[in-house]
Amino acid sequence: MSVIQIDSASLLRQISCLFAVWGSTCSVYAQSVTIKGYVLSEKDKSPIDAASVVIRTPDSTVVTVGVTNENGQFQVLVPKHIDTLLVQLHHINFENYAAKVKANEVGCLYMKPLSRGLAEIVVKGHRPLVKGRDGGLSYDAKILSQQSSVHDAYAILSGVPGVIRQGQDLLLVGSPRFSIALNGEIPPIPQEHLIKMLQSMPASKVDAVEVYYNAPPRYHTNGAVINVITKETLEQDNHLQGEMYSTFYHHHYPYSKAGVNLNYLRDKLSLSMMYGYDYQKRFLTNTLTSHHTVGESVYDIEQKTKETSSYHSHIAYFNAGYKLPQGNITATYSGEYNPYIEKELEIMGNATGNNHKKLHDAMHSASLKYLNSKGFQVGMSLVNYKYDGKQDFEITSPARKSKFKSDFGQHIRTYRAYVDNAHSLPGGWQVGYGLSTSYTEEKDFQSFYASNVTDNPNISETLNEWITRAYLKADKKFSEQFNIASSMAGELSVVSGKRDYAIFPQVNATYIVNPNNVIQFMVSSNKVYPFY
């Protein structure tokens, strides 16, 4: 008599796969379909936990992402009209999987195990979400990108724990303000220009994001810093790589941007170029109704405004690097040119009028930096900014009519140089010191012409500012979870002949319990500078 053996666990998984095919079409609501499936090992049919699931259309457009549970099951929502799906599976212990399937026939998907043996030892990789570094937190950009669909470098920041997005602005929980740095350095350009440059940089170029609630002294600034680290290309990879992108939105008016990124590497030379074009047109309305009582009289005020603004923006970035035997030298240029900015304001109600502005500005920045493998770096930069505009304003009320014209502008030039050094000491301690100095020339002017004023004041001011800063720091990494960093910085500023001194003590202690729980202790001091 023959005996038939049945593996109950294997049979249950096969039955589950049949039910998954049926279940993938059971839940339909709001023009979406719930797709269910199982991810199993091809070797022993065991479920695969924590496998990344990416659902795309046949032309590779990302629809949604998901992750499998401990039973190997995943469940995602896809638009109802999509019949064929491109399913991609990723897991560090298995080979990548990609196949086109029908939306109602997902069922069970099988991945091939991946292992590398060295002297009978299996090595398995692990990518932690967060690591402690120099008193701050370093987040893996690849893992951040998997948590949500992002297209540019600036959008990745909104996925960092503790960073909240409000409209187009980012807020860092626990800090009233922060600066954005690029590759360990705050570029010598206004932050709004850097944000536009990051919005034009593809997300695939970002390697990690570092968050410092107390910026390390090498940044030569106070307060919080979010540092964006771009990927480095290996020296042996001689190649030319390019990327093009375009985005289109439509609210009341269309908004579009497009750009190109090129990277060239040959031997010890690396070149990166980025160009972006941005066009926006906005429409805003505001209605105000109020009743003001003066004595025994009540005055009704009704006001309605319509504002239309439009601009064209060109953003360029160029970086050239050359590797030397003991370090590398880098030259960088970044610029933004807005040749046409126009704003039209129409006023209606108790008073009528209009305000018409035409503006244009340009910013150019060039820097040169040398960094060696032992932590010594020296650099210099030059920033030139020019802003000019014209305004034509007219308003008519029951009491009077006013009309004026004005020309205004601002020209700024900043020179900056810095030097930093670091040493490793016995016992895991590191010490560092550095010096930076900057000189700024600022010129502001305004010409004013009013129809009912005989004495039209013209304003012209010049401001010279010199800031020198020195620091000394010490830090130690006790483990992968715990590190301490401390520093003391002194600053001398001379603004239009007036001297001012300040010191900035700083202490950071960070303990990472797990990626979701981080304990930080900080002592910091800050100084608020005027915006240019």
Image: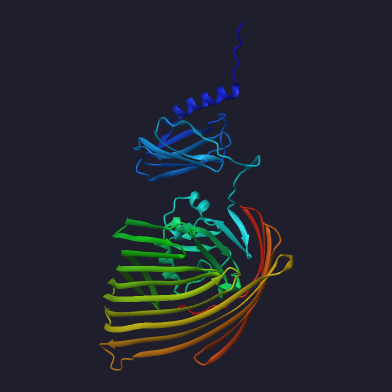
Residue 451 placement: quadrant: bottom left
Who's the residue at 51% across and 80% down the image? 417
Q: Is residue 439 visible?
A: yes
Left or right of 398, for residue 504: right
Tell me: residue 68, above or below residue 449: above
- The colouring scheme, among rainbow, by chain, secondary structure or one colour, is rainbow
Height in image: 425 above or below 150? below
* Percent x, y of residue 352: 26, 74
Please state the horizontal and vertical placement of residue 324, each as a whole percent of the image: 51, 69
Q: Residue at x 36, y 68 (%)?
A: 315
Question: How many marks overall?
Answer: 0
Residue 384, given in percent of the width and then of the height, sits at 40, 80
Q: Can residue 306 be seen from the camera position used here?
A: no
In this view of the protein, which residue sits in the foreground, 414 or 420?
420
Q: Nearer the viewer, residue 501 or 197?
A: 197
In the displayed structure, 144 sits above or below 4; it is below
Quadrant occupied by the N terminus: top right
In-image side of 26 versus 482 (left or right): left
